[in-house]
Amino acid sequence: MNKQTIEKRSFSIHYGKAVEEEISKLVSEIEKNEHLTSRFESRWLAIKLIEGDPNILEKTIAIENTSEVVESSIKSVEKLKKRFSDDLDSIFADKRYGWINGLVREIVDKSQAARISVSDRIDKVVTNRILGIPIFLAMMWVVFKFTTDGSGPFLDWVDGVIGGPITNWVGSLINLVGLGGTWVESLFMNGVIAGVGGVLVFVPVMLSLYFALAILEDSGYMARAAFVMDRLMHSLGLHGKSFMCMIVGFGCTVPACYATRTLENEKDRILTGLLVPFMSCGARLPVYVLFASIFFPQNSDTVIFLLYLTGIVVAMLLGVILNGTLFKKRERSPFVLELPPYRMPTLRNIWFLMWERTSAFVRKAFSFIMITSIIIWLLMAIPVNGGSFAETEVEHSSFAYINRGISPIFQPTGFASWQNAGAIVTGFVAKEVVVGTMGQIFKVEEAEEELAATSFFEDLGEVVSSFFTAVVDTIKSIPLIVGIDLFEGEDEDTNTELMAIVQIHFEEVSGGHGALASLAFMVFVLLYTPCMVAVAAQIQEFGAKWAIFGAVLQLVVAYISSVLVFQGGLLLGLG
């Protein structure tokens, strides 16, 4: 081969999500220092500092204004040592040898078959050209089946605790300080508890989802999933590494945007960054669970699975369109992926992944969501046509007035009402707020009921006893995941007051097509802008122009898709 025809290619080893996040943070610090970037390649230096290379560390310290970079590298090393029980050198070595092994497999043609390991035997099935994608889809279906069936009893438990004992205790404290019946009581009951509490109800759902995903990730299967989807991605003209970023997007869009830094080509990064938001992040799951449980109680897991699959399909179709238009002229870079050996997942790693992701969800509930809930309550408390502050009917509030002007836009989607428009608008802040907003709106509207007088210890006893009931119900639900009902005939009532009110509301606004309208609503939530933090991450990574383009694209696709779902369903006589 002529030397002139040899294409110069750059390769980048992916060290895993946890390590890559720390590398990305350190790269950002290094690139702020011109003295460092003029002497070292940023990513190489970040890796060497995290590895603890004494020679490179000494040279870095000797350069001007590098104290912040060194401090950041120390923090990253400490965090990774807590995350991994192995020595960091072993982690880096394992990833590099895995990368080399993958490269050798791609370019070396062995005349005699080498000894086949257990991992290789499994990979012959799960990475098979024909069976690979169906197996991946089946694994995802099991994940969502486990998420819905396994978390249901605990979802009811948390809802009962928040709506019962916690509401009782907060109300008692407010009365104790003499503020009962005032706007302060309304703020806590109809603002904080209805908004934040309505979101915290879904913490068991998040724990179940991240538990299942952690098992797949820690066992080594998720790397196979990326490898399997790489073939499909290439056939659509997309980069294989893009799907790795999309897999991260199942957890949260923000780190998925940062994960695009592993792509060498700038246009590949931007294209992938535009597609990542269509992956259904964990924050959307509470909306799916609420509506699927109301309108599709017997098939809620299948509906949720199909929504996640829809996000993947839409992203790929848009990828093909953008690849043939805005990103037509771009260089293609190779895709080399390390396939680690299969390992038995450890409880330590599973718990770490579950806690890390769910705690981020809870922190958001007590920051963005609480602030948004208070703003929504304030808008609901301000009357438009006379009335007293915090005593006006919700339909006469500023919140209703603002969203009545928006709601006609959603007429073709089947869910046109100021309540639903308000939930979608507040969902721009964070998708969890959609459920919280509905909790605030409909709990304000419903008639206040006098709660039975109970003591603190009676409430506490009820919390404990209902917890153990939820544990028993969860154990009973495990056989249902594989379609076996060992407790046939037992009636479970999983409906909450919010579910009943939402069901009636959607039936009314859709003209009796509540199930179809709810499906259109879920599709809209799936496809429109994930959250404000995700937009900020896109601005940081790809620039304001592409971030704005992405947000507009997501809104247009969401609206068109939801209209097609509802109007198409009506034409087919569904819903």
Image: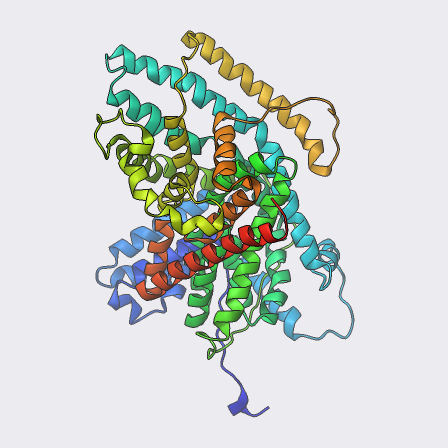
Coloring applied to the structure: rainbow
Dividing the picture into quadrants, the one containing residue 340 is bottom right
Judge by depth and name the residue closer to the eye, 40 or 235.
Answer: 235
* Lateral position of residue 517 relative to residue 178, left or right: right
Looking at the picture, does residue 228 appear above or below residue 460?
A: below
Give how far across and how far down residue 434 sits, in percent. Answer: 42, 40
Give how far across and how far down residue 377 sits, in percent. Answer: 30, 32
Give how far across and how far down residue 120 sits, in percent. Answer: 72, 58
Judge by depth and name the residue closer to the eye, 113 or 491.
Answer: 491
Let me know if residue 154 appears in the view: yes
Dividing the picture into quadrants, the one containing residue 114 is bottom right
Looking at the picture, does residue 19 appear above or below residue 442?
A: below
Can you say which quadrant of the picture contains the N terminus? Answer: bottom right
Q: Residue at x 25, y 23 (%)?
A: 183
Looking at the picture, does residue 261 appear above or below residue 502?
A: below
Give how far across and how far down residue 502 sits, in percent. Answer: 48, 33
Q: Residue at x 58, y 23 (%)?
A: 470
* Lateral position of residue 262 relative to residue 418, left or right: right
Judge by depth and name the residue closer to the eye, 152 or 437.
Answer: 437
* Lateral position of residue 451 relative to residue 102, left or right: left
Q: In the orientation shown, which residue stands out farthest toward the right?
A: 112
Can you say which quadrant of the picture contains the C terminus? Answer: top right
Looking at the picture, does residue 150 appear above or below residue 325?
A: above
All told, the count of numbered labels is 0
Q: Residue at x 75, y 26 (%)?
A: 486
Let me know if residue 343 appears in the view: no
